Image (cartoon, rainbow, N blue to C red):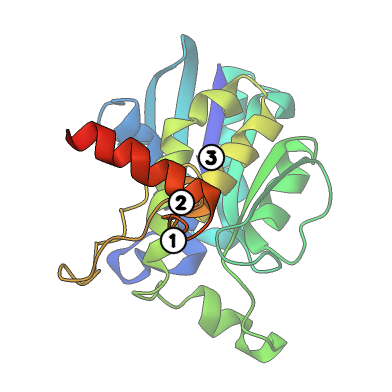
Amino acid sequence: MHLLVGLGNPGDQYRNNRHNIGFMAIDAIAKRHNFPAFRQKFSGLVSEGTIDGERVLLLKPQTFMNRSGDSVAAATSFYKLGPEAVTVLYDEIDLVPGKVRIKIGGGAGGHNGIRSIDPQIGPAYRRVRLGVGHPGHKDGVMPHVLGDFSKADQEWLVPLLEAVGDNAGMLVNGDDSGFMNKLALAVSGDGAERPQRPDTADPKRPKAQSHIRAARPSKTTVKPPEHGALADMLRKILKKDES
């Protein structure tokens, strides 16, 4: 079994916060892979299903962020899972919005949810850091992460979450590079079908020739000579044709 954990805070007032992008990612995975409805367990909301044939448990701790480890530890203890079977998705202010990085182990980086999990299951689990941007000053960090995503944020947030759901199998199978690449392409829009540019040319204006046709020299008309032997010969030929 693989445990996919999304971090966030419970309650409608936090639902659209940047701090809750982990919850959003787990919901996107559940929707894309037709997981059953979440139920209460392990001080969190859980749903069990399969992704690419692998058994997966989705978990959204309901303990508030700074006690996320209580919920994660309860789940790993029940299923006897080591940290190598755990992936945690959460917000990262030190990454630009929409950028994603994955690592195994490391420090908490000031994130209260990670700080709560590390001492309970050990640090050697996979961390999927979802960039939400930095407000520019440390005093603005808390209002930033506890603030809702803006309308402009939807331009990268929606494709990012869809890509998380579509490519969750790569996480389960350990293809971290492939997963990050898929998400980067989704956010950048590369490979998407682009609308054709409308034809705004003046219909009365003649169409420009192609570069091949334009490069071809035009046919010139040679004026026959009026005097001399050649002129006399041409006149005899023309006179003969007319007779």
Q: Position of residue 117 (x, y in %)?
A: 68, 47
Q: Earlier in the sequence, mark 3 or mark 1?
A: 3
Q: Which residue is mark 1?
A: 226
Is 225 left, or right, of 16 in this rendering?
right
- The mark nearer the N terminus, 1 or 2, is 1
Upstream in the sequence, badge 2 or badge 3?
Answer: 3
Can you give x and y, in whole percent of width and height, for residue 177 in the image?
Answer: 70, 33
Cα separation between marks 2 and 3: 98 Å
Q: Amino acid at mark 2?
A: Ala
Direction top: furthest residue:
53
Q: Which mark is residue 137?
A: none
Q: Name the mark nearer the viewer: 2 or 3.
A: 2
Nearer to me, 226 or 11: 226
- Closer mark to the observer between disc 3 and disc 1: 1
Instruction: Determine if residue 223 is in view.
Output: yes
Q: Is residue 13 left or right of residue 61?
A: left
Q: Residue at x 16, y 67 (%)?
A: 203
Marks 1 and 2 in Cβ contact (< 8 Å): yes
> Percent x, y for residue 5?
53, 40
Q: Which mark is residue 231?
A: 2
Query: Can you say whether 131 is above or below 242 in the image?
Result: below
Secondary structure of residue under mark 3? strand
Number of marks drawn: 3
Q: Nearer the viewer, residue 204 or 160?
A: 204
Q: Residue at x 20, y 72 (%)?
A: 202
Disc 1 to disc 2, how far (Cα)? 6 Å
Please identify the quarter of the rendering in which residue 50 is found: top left
176 or 233, which lies in front? Answer: 233
For mark 2, give the secondary structure: helix
Q: Is residue 124 above or below residue 109?
A: above
Q: Residue at x 28, y 65 (%)?
A: 12
According to the picture, the residue beneath numbered tag 3 turns out to be 5
